Image (tube, helix red, strand yellow):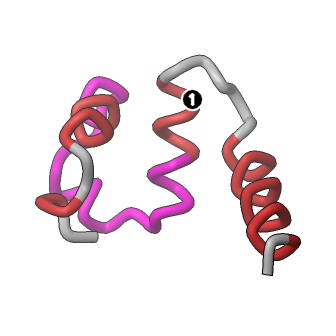
Amino acid sequence: MNITKIDPAVVEALRKRGHEESDIAKMTPEFAFTEYCEWHGLIRWGDTLIRTLDSLRASAA
């Protein structure tokens, strides 16, 4: 991922979670989202939240 295109607050949360910028650049968006969720206390919720949003978006089409 291009780190300069990621919201700085997200990058900061991933750094606080222990990831270097080089690691963040190699992450998939889904993995980065899950790590962001876990940093904010949403443990093991990343995949569920992604699926929920995908489902809602599909229903709006």
Q: Is residue 57 left or right of residue 33?
A: right
Relative to residue 23, is residue 26 depicted above or below? below
**Where residue 29 appears, x then y in whole percent?**
46, 63
- From this view, report whether residue 40 is shown above or below residue 36: above
Q: Is residue 23 above or below residue 41?
A: below
Please state the horizontal and vertical placement of residue 10, each as a whole percent of the image: 32, 39
Q: Quadrant of residue 20?
A: top left
With 2 as the anchor, is 29 left or right in this view?
Answer: right
Stretch in magenta: 15-33
Q: Position of residue 52 (x, y in %)?
A: 81, 54
Residue beneath the point at 18% across and 59% down:
3
**Image-quadrant location for residue 8:** top left
The quadrant the C terminus occupies is: bottom right
Task: Find residue 2 and report its horizontal and vertical position in percent.
Answer: 20, 69
Q: Nearer the viewer, residue 24 or 5?
A: 5
Q: Quadrant of the N terminus?
A: bottom left
Which element carries disc 1, helix, strand or loop?
helix
The secondary structure making up most of the magenta span is: helix
Residue tagged by mark 1? 38
Residue shown at 12% from the left, 60% from the top:
4
Name the residue furthest left.
4
Q: Residue at x 47, y 37 (%)?
A: 36
Amino acid type of the residue that numbered disc 1 sits on in the rendered structure = Glu
- How many numbered tags mark residues here? 1
Residue 53 versus residue 21: which sits nearer the camera? Answer: 53
Residue 31 lies in the magenta stretch = yes
Q: Residue furthest top?
A: 41
Q: Image check: 53 left or right of 1? A: right
CA neighbours of label 1 inside 10 A, class few (<14), some (14 to 19), many (20+): some
> Picture quarter containing residue 51?
bottom right
